[in-house]
Image: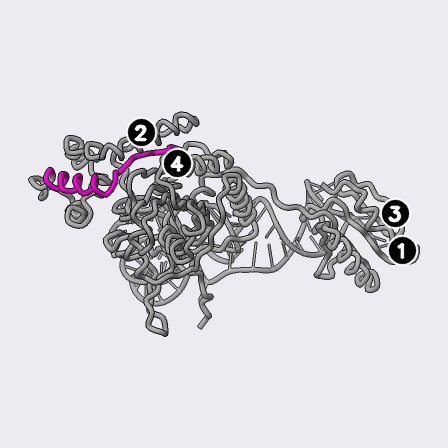
Amino acid sequence: MSKEPIRSIKGTQDILPDQSSRWQTLESTIRNTMHTYDYFEIRTPAFENTSLFLHSVGEESDIVSKEMYTWIDQGGENLTLKPELTAPVTRAFIQNNLGGLNPINKLYYIDSLFRRERPQKGRYRQFHQFGVEVFGSEFPEIDVEVISLAMSIFNTLELEGLTLELNSIGSEDCRNNFRTAIKEYLKPNFDKLSETSQKRFKRNPLRILDTKSLEEKTLLKDGPQISDYWTSDDKDHFNEVCELLDKINIKFELSPNLVRGLDYYTRTTFEVTSNLLGAQNAICGGGRYDGLVEQLGGKPTPGIGFAAGMERLLLVNQKSDETIKSQIYVIGLGDSARSLIINIALELRQNNIRTSFDLLRRSIKSQMRDANKLGAKYVIIIGEEELAKNIATIKNLSNSDQEQIPLDSILSHIKSLPLK
RNA sequence: GUGGGUGUAGCUCAGCUGGUUAGAGCACCUGGUUGUGGCCCAGGAGGCCGUGGGUUCAAGUCCCAUCACUCACCCCA
């Protein structure tokens, strides 16, 4: 009976050292851009009360109805690993009265989320998103700032093949009117609709626009359009957003059927897709949610945000990353030298010089190999001969030059060398 | 939840219509240099051929089941 090793959970992944540097560069690019826009980071807990998501994302949404990791804890509380971040950040915004401290709050996050779906390319059960949530402004300038912030990060990452799709699903009134109109229009054809569309017809008619079926698409083409039901304010808002985007040279496509899956969206919705991915080609999605804060018990406060999937960004961003290289490798031959190099390595490290030495008591040959593999620039060799003369041999690995220096001048000597 | 594809060395894979000790490249280790890396050369280690069952004189190869991975549907980042 051989023991089966324990495996990671389906849809989760280990990020190993050969990949972690790509994550680090991605994260620092995100933070840098966020800071140039004066957005500040918010961190929320990994899990929340389940009701938070029921009341924001919507009970009929796929996320809530079939994808959440939910459990009852030992105290009887109903908890859920966060499947998205707008609701938790909004909850934190309300709970900490951020709106009372500042009329506008520009928040960003980089975080892990959890959804129990069947994994596939670009989709995992634990995945990472970065994004922003801005509370307090109803004006188009902020819609545009948020979009331009997202695009600016993608530009810095030199991503190619991206498309920005834009739509407005109008305010509350608009959507109510549209909802009755589209139901009216589709009612005679109800039997012809797909099963999912029939469900949506009852629960969330707006999302029928999302359909993939060609027949339904052509049927919808001649039906009522959301834009016909925009209030004049909705229309003005959307036009201003488009104009401002033009003004700062951000290209976009109008997608009248871009309805996002979550209940809380209003007015502006947008999505960025990549033609380099498979079926899961959305790398970023966002929009306005002017009613959400109030819905979750806060003072009426407009909001807008986006979230971008980091695993997908890394799939799109195939640029290779230079690996971090060591600088100094210290070799000690013999017992006394071996104990000496521990001190030398320590001193170099305290001076911010990347330093390694052999931990397997291997031969000098293997140690040289190891130094080479680590990308060290110089090797310091201390053996019997050197010890006797109180010197160290320093070898430049790129041109094989070797020189000998006094033992007590190692640090100053190394500091004078080009270590890059 | 549904469908397709794939499971052979640490990694990428070969193994033809079933046939004898299961291979390659890369990586790893040792040696070629009494204390010197990369390149080269020589050698070495490393495989319940995913797992269980079946057909057969004979199974990595065929059949069934099962598990895992993967892609896709649904939906989303």
Query: Which residue is outermost to the left?
Result: A188
Disc 3: which residue: A404
| Closer mark to the observer between disc 4 and disc 1 | 4
Amino acid at dot 4: Ser
Amino acid at dot 2: Asn
| Residue A91 at x, y percent in the picture | 37, 56
Structural distance between the alpha carbons of marks 4 and 1: 62 Å
Tell me if residue A130 can be seen: no
| Residue A215 at x, y percent in the picture | 16, 35
| Closer mark to the observer between disc 3 and disc 2 | 2
Structural distance between the alpha carbons of marks 3 and 2: 73 Å
Q: Which residues are magenta?
A: A163-185
Structural distance between the alpha carbons of marks 1 and 2: 80 Å
| Quadrant in which the C terminus of chain A is drawn | top right
Q: Name the residue: 44% across, 67% down.
A: A4
Q: Residue A193, located in which quarter of the rendered image? A: top left
Secondary structure of the residue carrying numbered label 3: strand
Pointer 2 chain: A
Q: Which mark is residue A216?
A: none
Amino acid at dot 1: Glu
Disc 4: which residue: A274
